[in-house]
Image (tube, helix red, strand yellow):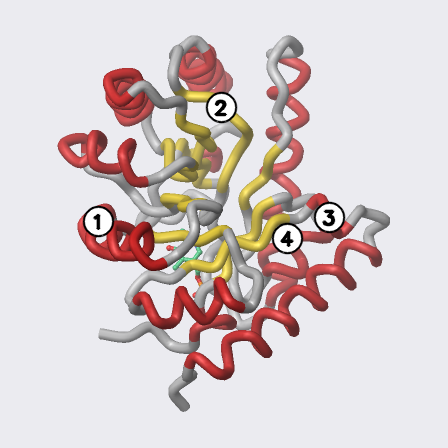
């Protein structure tokens, strides 16, 4: 059943309530969790409806699609909208991404981090970045591959070396980590993945104590409550707000 603009306020209220309950269950302050409405494939009128319902953080996963949409949003919506890039960025699109987004959740390789910092510098901006980690090792997923570490200290050291380089980039402010759990009908299947991301964050805090690691971007429509229980500060929800993807 297609969702209309009128349903979006109710969907957002329900999701916010579930986030709050999950935070309280796990002894967390609900205000420490930011809901990002992932609006990919949906048009500007859906984004406007969400804005009317108090939503300010929006996510897109393709630079090409976001270009027109964000330009339009900048015309019709106030400037307190915050755009998050959650999808893989091709190197040649990094300049466009830097101009469009204030957060990039998909630092999935050193090269893109370098490009984004340079592009941000040229624009006189600083970008917030999250290092994307492929916890489960699924072939289809982007990100630094954590699954190979148990028997691979050198890979772990290589990752830490890349992190150190990213932390030194002048116009990318590293804010934490991002992951996507493998698709499953059962949200509990995502729990070990989210827990490992949190443990990796703790390891990075120990390794790079001068750096703050405040954010964990994890949880989507099917598993955001589990993610909040495991420490998510940014949850990326699309379908549960806007309905099935269009087109
Ligand atoms: C599409 C997308 C989401 C939202 O997924 P839903 O299951 O629709 O909530 C979250 N994160 C990323 C990286 C996405 O591409």
Note whether 63 is above or below 237 in the view shown.
above
Spatial CA distance of label 3 from label 4 is: 15 Å
Spatial CA distance of label 2 from label 4 is: 20 Å
Mark 1: give few (<14), some (14-19) or many (20+) Cα within 10 Å. Answer: some
Q: Position of residue 67 (x, y in %)?
A: 21, 49
x 48%, y 33%: residue: 146
Does dot 3 land on a helix, a strand or a loop?
A: helix
Most foreground residue, 26 or 21:
21
Q: Which residue is mark 1?
A: 67
Spatial CA distance of label 2 from label 1 is: 24 Å
> Can you say which quadrant of the picture contains the N terminus?
bottom left
Spatial CA distance of label 2 from label 3 is: 21 Å
Does dot 1 land on a helix, a strand or a loop?
A: helix
Does dot 2 land on a helix, a strand or a loop?
A: strand
Q: Position of residue 56 (x, y in %)?
A: 51, 53
**Residue 110, visible in the rendered structure:** no
Spatial CA distance of label 1 from label 3 is: 30 Å
Q: Which residue is mark 3?
A: 31
Left or right for 74, reference 28: left
Note whether 110 is above or below 226 in the view shown.
above
Mark 3: give few (<14), some (14-19) or many (20+) Cα within 10 Å. Answer: few
């Amino acid at each position: 059943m297609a969702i209309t603009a009128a349903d979006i306020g109710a969907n957002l209220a329900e999701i916010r309530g579930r986030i709050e309950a999950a935070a309280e269950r796990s002894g967390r302050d609900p205000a420490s969790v930011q809901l990002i409405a992932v609006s990919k494939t949906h048009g500007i009128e859906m984004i406007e409806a969400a804005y009317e319902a108090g939503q300010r953080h929006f996510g897109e996963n393709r630079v090409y699609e976001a270009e027109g949409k964000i330009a339009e949003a900048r015309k019709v919506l106030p400037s307190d909208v915050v755009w998050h890039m959650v999808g893989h960025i091709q190197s040649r699109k990094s300049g466009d991404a830097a101009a469009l987004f204030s957060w990039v959740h998909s630092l999935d390789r050193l090269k893109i981090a370098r490009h984004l910092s340079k592009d941000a510098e040229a624009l006189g901006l600083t970008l917030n970045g999250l290092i994307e980690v492929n916890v489960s090792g699924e072939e289809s997923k982007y990100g630094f591959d954590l699954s190979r570490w148990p028997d691979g200290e050198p890979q772990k050291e290589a990752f830490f070396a890349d992190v150190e380089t990213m932390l030194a980039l002048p116009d990318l402010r590293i804010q934490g980590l991002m992951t996507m759990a493998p698709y499953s009908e059962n949200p509990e299947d995502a729990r070990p993945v989210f827990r490992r991301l949190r443990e990796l964050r703790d390891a990075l805090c120990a390794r790079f104590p001068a750096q703050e690691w405040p954010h964990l971007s994890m949880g989507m429509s099917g598993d955001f409550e589990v993610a909040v229980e495991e420490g998510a500060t940014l949850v990326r929800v699309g379908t549960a707000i806007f309905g099935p993807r269009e087109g």
